[in-house]
Amino acid sequence: MKLEKIRRLIRDASQFAEEAYNAPFRSAVARARREQDDLFMLLIFSEMMGVPNPASYYTLELQPIMLEKFHDWHKRMGMPHSPLDQFKCC
Amino acid sequence: MNAIFLMLMGLGAMALGYFVYSKFICQKIFKVDPNFVTPAHEMSDGVDYVPTNKYVLWGHHFTSVAGAAPIIGPAIAVIWGWVPAFLWVTLGTIFFAGVHDAGAIWASNRNKAKSIGAVTGDIIGSRARSIFMIVIFLVLLMVNAVFAVVIAKQLINFPSATIPVWGAIVVALIVGQLIYRRLINLLVVSIVGVVALYGMIYIGPMMPISLPETIGALSDNEAWIILLFVYAAIASLLPVWMLLQPRDYINGIQLFIGLGLLYGAVIISGPEVVAPAFNTDVPAGTPSIVPLLFVTIACGAISGFHGLVASGTTSKQLDKEPDLRFVGYFGAIGEGSLALAAIIATTAGFATLADWQSVYHAFGQGGVGAFIRGGANILESGLGLDETMAQTLLTVMVVLFAGTTMDTGLRLQRYIFQEWGSIYNMPWMNKGSVATLLAVGSCLLLAFGAGGDGSGGLLIWPLFGTTNQLLGGLTLLVITVMLVKLGRPMIYTLAPLVFLLVMTIAGLVIQLKGFYVKEDWFLFTLDLVVLIAAIVITLECVATLTSTIKERKAAEAKE
């Protein structure tokens, strides 16, 4: 019974610490991650944009998975519609 | 008088402020509404807008606003005696800082959690917004320059702190990797990190490290300043999770430990306050207490910088509107208690009045050095720590605060340069490295322009205070205008606003004369820029308030 209580206390404390560690930097970390993702997006679609990519055979498979994110991406990059003729999302 | 009494009086008054005055302000003036849907819920996106537990949010808010500034200001200002500094810190915290900080969160919260600069643009006008940007830039510039000078001075005075101060960076880097790669549980990491830091504080006095007195054409002080900026530039370019995040986290823990140790030692040893209540025998060259006291102690009594934190990040994470009382007002009280600790350390930490006078032999002397020496004496008699070790501990505490503020400040300055780059269509300025170089360059220019040997670095401290107060004034103006529009009493924010503007302008004029007499044209120009900003802000205040009050009256007459 007591052991259970201590365990719960530790779990609560570490949740609290986790929150205290992450809350202040949530947006900065997310922004940095988004920047990395944007680069990744560029790599995947590079062939379509005329940039030769030796791995395009593999990245082609990823394109459908990225469809949803692609829409957010081109909007974020200041293009109201998809810039690619073959790849329409909106 | 005994320092325990001083401590109880200060903390008691602040507690009263929290339980009575803040309740009145939040319920009757801001009329916080538990049913109001805060932007954290309305625009919840899991990134910027996240409803956060109020204790976590308070911890975050408090540790971001508390830094070296509430220590430096009071440590300089006790030269006029302990009573004026004590009164300004307690009353300032209760009637100025608490209202300002909670008000900034409220104003931002009611305006879709926009930053206070953007709210200024919406409510007052685009001209006020541009001034806001300039004032923010100046505040950041001065903070970085002053803190570099302060850190360099402490590293020279207390070489035993060199290892823990730089070692803390290594610890933070390791902690950052461990957490990012999810190698160990955060709770374990925090304990290990703090233990490692204190281990180095223990080792530091055994291996004091100082730079040679001259390195090429540079003195040791100049070399430290340059090294610090090299560090800050690199740190501000690294991803936040790598260094800044773990560093901030450990600093936060260290802040609570440091405050606890200091107040604990005061209670155990009960030192006598040796400094005079009112110093009638101030050293020659000390400026008049009014208005200089009110700009020398900025953070700890009221600080405009808090408004930036309150509106920038805190308001986006506010779970329920009534939480802002705890987060904002109690955050200000946390900062006030740090300033109070600094007052006690610098007035009760010396054995005799003569000792105190030999430290405070000229204006601008004493400062952080006096806090470290005095605080270490209290820690020694209260907790039985070795004197050098106690000094190392406090030096590390101050330097870590100042250091984190420097890399955050430099990062923010870089963002401002990058923003200017995109506004004025200069793509080269948009590059991270170029913008960082510009930021570092402008800080170095100020640090060395204000006195290359570093001794003059603290000359800009009161100037920093004025700029910071101006920022606070702008925020108070925004809150006041909002209150007038809602038809609520404005006296609770207008009175601090008027007081701040009068003291700031008077302080600027006096310093302007001082720089003119000393023929320090660099600081003269800087002072002039701030003075112009202050006058423009005052005019904006008068114009906006009169027109808002007129509109309000016309609307009431119609009804």
Image (cartoon, coloured by chain):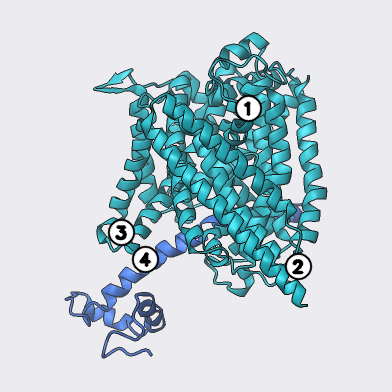
Tags 2 and 1 both on a single chain: yes
Along the line of sight, the residue nearer the viewer: B256 or A4: B256
Q: Amino acid at mark 2?
A: Asp
Q: Position of residue B122 (x, y in %)?
A: 54, 67
Q: Residues within 10 Å of mark 2 (few under 14, many from 20)?
A: few
Q: Which residue is mark 3?
A: B430
Do discs 2 and 3 belong to a common subunit? yes
Q: CA distance from mark 4 to mark 3?
A: 15 Å
Find the distance from the CA under tag 4 to the CA under tag 2: 38 Å
Q: Which residue is rendered at x = 35% and y = 58% of the image?
A: B420
The residue that mark 4 highlights is A35
Quick one: SS at disc 2?
loop
Q: Nearer the viewer, mark 4 or mark 2?
A: 2
- What's the colour of chain A in the image? blue
Q: CA distance from mark 2 to mark 1?
A: 41 Å
Q: Chain of mark 2?
A: B
Disc 3 residue type (three-letter): Asn
* Colour for chain B in the figure: cyan
Indicate whether A72 appears above or below A14. Answer: below
Q: Secondary structure at mark 3?
A: helix
Chain name for mark 1: B
Amino acid type of the residue tagged 4 in the rendering: Glu
- Residue at horizontal 23 percent and vertical 77 percent from the top: A46
Residue contact at pointers 2 and 1, CB within 8 angstroms: no
Pointer 4 indicates a residue of which chain? A
Q: Quadrant of the N terminus of chain B?
A: top right
Mark 3 is surrounded, within 10 Å at the Cα level, by few (under 14), some (14 to 19) or many (20 or more) other residues, namely: many
Residue that carries the numbered disc 1 in the rendered image: B289
Q: Are marks 4 and 3 on the same chain?
A: no
User: Closest to the observer: B341 or B16?
Assistant: B16
